[in-house]
Image: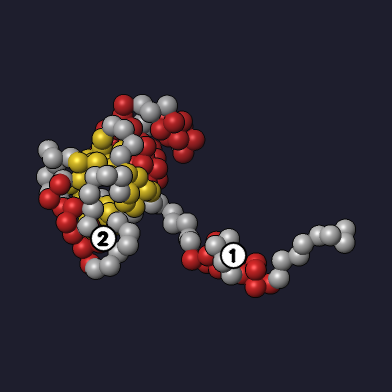
Amino acid sequence: DHNRVYKSLSDVIEGKEGRVRETLLGKRVDYSGRSVIVVGPSLSLHRCGLPREIAIELFQAFVIRDLIRKHLASNIGVAKSQIRKKKPIVWEILQEILDDHPVLLNRAPTLHRLGIQAFLPVLVEGRAICLHPLVCKGFNADFDGDQMAVH
């Protein structure tokens, strides 16, 4: 077709939809999540509220391991099925795991070392990460829709 508009190589590489911005600068990170933050005034300063949905995604391998070790699942498939069905034992095991595994919370832009901090997670309902209001200053965060990444 002689009326077709062609893109130059520089058009493909540069700009907002360019290859550099699309793939090279924005990477997907395994075992991480992102959510809105909400206030959790009852939390200790060293704890954060982690939504069940995010926590099970981050720590699924540990939960599967423990289900099999404790003879609550005979294999990986059975363990994954128990996780999918959200059996109560899954949440108990997950909380045990979380007590020994701190998570990193990061609020972009990370301009200084307080932009990333470690917390011991507690399972919470809903889909938002809960933070004690006194730890927000280091993140330069407030509760008007700010998002944080969890690793």
| Numbered tag placed on residue 18 in the rendering | 1
Q: 6 left or right of 50?
A: right
Residue 53 vertical placement versus 117 (above, below)? above
Label 1 crowding class (10 Å Cα cut-off): few <14, some 14-19, many 20+? some
Whole-angstrom CA distance, mark 1 to mark 2, is: 29 Å
What quarter of the picture does the C terminus occupy? bottom left
Instruction: Report which quarter residue 82 is drawn in.
Output: top left
Instruction: Report which quarter residue 132 is drawn in.
Output: top left
The residue most toward the front is: 3
Q: Which amino acid type is shown beneath numbered disc 1?
A: Gly
- Tell me the residue at 40%/51% (across/down): 31
- Tell me the residue at 36%/42% (across/down): 54
Disc 1 element: loop
Q: Where residue 140 sits: x, y (%)?
A: 22, 57
Q: 143 left or right of 72?
A: left
Q: How many marks?
A: 2
Residue 50 vertical placement versus 113 (above, below)? above
Of residues 128 and 109, the one drawn nearer to the viewer in this rendering = 109
The residue most toward the bottom is: 10
Disc 2 element: strand
Q: Earlier in the sequence, mark 1 or mark 2?
A: 1
Q: Which amino acid type is shown beneath numbered disc 2?
A: Ile
Judging by the rendered image, the residue that carries numbered circle 2 is: 116
Of residues 74 and 143, the one drawn nearer to the viewer in this rendering = 143
Give the mark toward the camera: 1 or 2.
1
What quarter of the picture does the N terminus occupy? bottom right
Q: Where residue 80 sits: x, y (%)?
A: 45, 35
Instruction: Report which quarter residue 44 is drawn in.
Output: top left
Label 2 crowding class (10 Å Cα cut-off): few <14, some 14-19, many 20+? many
